[in-house]
Image: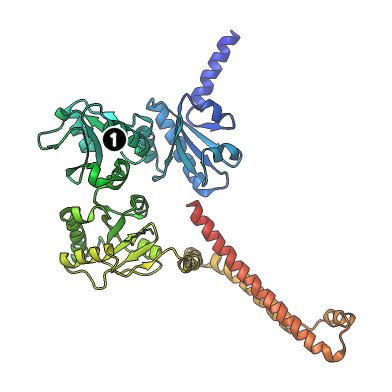
Amino acid sequence: MALLRAAFSSLLFSSAFALVQDLDDTFKDSRMEDVWLVDFYAPWCGYCKKLEPVWQEVGAELTRSGSPVRVGKMDATAYSGVASDFGVRGYPTIKLLKGELAYNYKGPRTKDDIIEFANRVAGPAVRSLPSRQMFEHVLKRHSVLFLYVGGESPLKEKYTDVASELIVYTYFFSASEDVLPESVALHELPSVVVFKDGTYFTYDEYEDGSLSSWVNRERFQSYLPIDGFTLYELGETGKLVAIAVTDEKDPTERSGRLKGLIQRVAAEHRDQFNRDFQFGHMDGNDYINSLIMGEVSVPSIIILNTSNEQYFVPAEPVEDLEQLLRFFSSVLDGSAPAFGGDGIFQRIKRVAYDARSTVMSVFRSSPLLGCFLFGLPLGVISLMCYGICTAESDDDTELMKRDGFTDEEEDEGEEEEQQQLTAGAEGEEDEDREKIEQKSMTEKKVD
Ligand SMILES: *[C@@H]1O[C@H](CO)[C@@H](O)[C@H](O)[C@H]1NC(C)=O
């Protein structure tokens, strides 16, 4: 009877709590049998709090769909040892843990994206496609897909290794040749092929370098709409990102024309530029402006080097394809002037820029709060300055007398002290500014 009750309560326990488990120190030893999706959070972090309800839904959905993935969360500040063993450096960090392997999730923190990631990474790194029908089906579902064609081979082993590492980014399939439609003609077998942009490209060991670097370069459509998040992802390919900054609501066709030109470069001049460039367009210039701490006109073309934060803009507005091609070539051969960068000057500029935007955004969202936050300390400081400059308190003179100042020396001494005090007040103001700057920097880090 007691046994039954214990079994019953454990059943209850698991159905009530299995959706998202609170993990502790013991997790490190007990996790190995299962695949785990874990949110490492800090109780004070705002992004973590935002993630929490999404995380509960992720737990519920994965449990409901019968997924083998177990969902947990760990207070990384309470179990910092465990967290740092898993390489957790910021909050929240989402990881899928599968035996010895740990995969970081860096995508948007929405339920669907996280679940898609969990299902993709938890499954086999290479999925086999047994039929033409299956092939057509996955081709419809994925804008980019990698396919190994052929039997067992050293290339297949390499492909499997690459897949188990890069499954965080994309899907990997394998099939035999007869699964492919007649329109796909491979020169040799085995082959690795990427299907995208309405066509396919075959990996060439001699021209394309290592398989993993090729997959990393080819894992995006060559042209795509870009937002802040995709820009960051595209940067990880190590390519330059060429963007048409456009206004989607522009009634004239100027924006559309630049988009069309970039699209043509992507499609018609792939051989020349695909290796070094990723192409796309971005609606509006707000994001780019804050990135380069300047102003780009709309519509216009900009090329970003996300590895060193440099950017390139054409000397004159781009009118035709020839001009655009010349611009791309000039960036590649180094003759186009680079702007920005990650040098010390740019970093100082970034800190000042972020501090200014923080202050501006506070004022914009609530002018009263802004006045209070920044006006009050300023007011206090100026009052203090005023007080110090005009004060002629008895204590001061007495103090100086005790220190052995004669009447003649007194004036001089007072002046000196005043200077020191005002300098002190200025120092305080600097400190305030520094605090704001520090804050904006930590905010960026948490991001
Ligand atoms: C982009 O930045 C990387 C890293 O600093 C550098 O090696 C590369 O030459 C840059 N590319 C261009 C076109 O400036």
On the question of residue 245 being in view, the answer is no
**Relative to residue 169, is residue 141 drawn left or right?**
left
Q: Position of residue 153 (x, y in %)?
A: 26, 29
Depth check, front residue: 107 or 279: 279
Figure check: 385 above or below 71: below
Residue bearing the label numbered 1: 172
**Relative to residue 142, is residue 24 drawn left or right?**
right
Q: What colouring style does the render use?
A: rainbow
Tell which quarter ligand 1 is in. bottom left
Look at label 1 and name its amino acid: Phe
**Relative to residue 3, is residue 392 drawn left or right?**
right
The residue at 28%/35% (across/down) is 172
Figure check: 62 above or below 247: above
Depth check, front residue: 378 or 206: 206
Q: Position of residue 155 (x, y in %)?
A: 27, 33
**Relative to residue 139, is residue 11 drawn left or right?**
right
The residue at 18%/26% (across/down) is 131
